[in-house]
Image: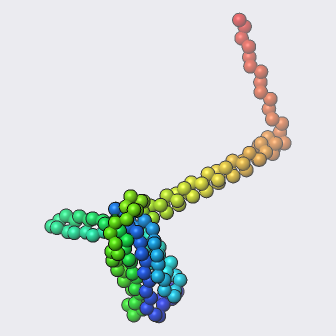
Amino acid sequence: MIHLPDVPLHTEVVVEVNKKGQVVRVKATKPCKIQSFNLQTYGNALQMWIRKCRTEGNTTSCTAETGLYRVTYDYDPRTQSVTRRVALISAGGTWANDEGAANVMIEMAQKQAEAAEAAERKAQAEQNAKLPSLNEIRGVPTPKPMPAATLPP
């Protein structure tokens, strides 16, 4: 059973956003007293996209602004919901061309999975190399190769 807090919670996260609107890194945090809420909001902030979207008729266009943003999370125990607010602190930054944090985490996870798979294959190959041959298990001597037949000149 999930036990939700009985008190209101508030956290703030300052993030750097690239030119695509992806969060590049978390620059600072202002945590609350409940660690699990801090971890959830930190993880959510790392995966965010911050964009402004406009809908005109049937078309929607979104733009992103490189900058430093403050993201606040407020938990209301009466409604058991979290409200997230985003505010621009300052525009611009040297991280405009940096890759988003979520993409970096995905690449790292893929590399780790590939390395674990390669290690598993290597361990399996080493284990298979140590196995006796089927003839040794059965107690039958290994057959010797037949000499090749020679044809007259």
Is 130 rendered above or below residue 72? above
Is 145 rendered above or below residue 63? above
Q: Left or right: 57 with respect to 30?
A: left
* Residue located at (83% from left, 39% from top): 140
* Residue located at (37% from left, 74% from top): 69
Residue that sits furthest to the left in the current view:
57
* Residue located at (82% from left, 42% from top): 136
Q: Left or right: 52 with respect to 29?
A: left
Q: Is residue 21 visible?
A: no
| Residue 148 on image: x %, y % | 74, 19
Is 57 rendered above or below residue 70? above
| Residue 97 on image: x %, y % | 38, 58
* Residue located at (84% from left, 42% from top): 139
Q: Is residue 141 visible?
A: yes
Residue that sits furthest to the top in the current view:
153
Q: How many marks?
A: 0
User: In terms of image quadrants, where is residue 76?
Assistant: bottom left
Q: Left or right: 104 with respect to 83?
A: right
Q: Left or right: 32 with respect to 59?
A: right
| Residue 133 on image: x %, y % | 77, 42
User: In terms of image quadrants, where is residue 12?
Assistant: bottom left
- Which part of the image, by quadrant, shows the C terminus? top right
Nearer to me, 95 or 47: 95
| Residue 16 on image: x %, y % | 40, 69
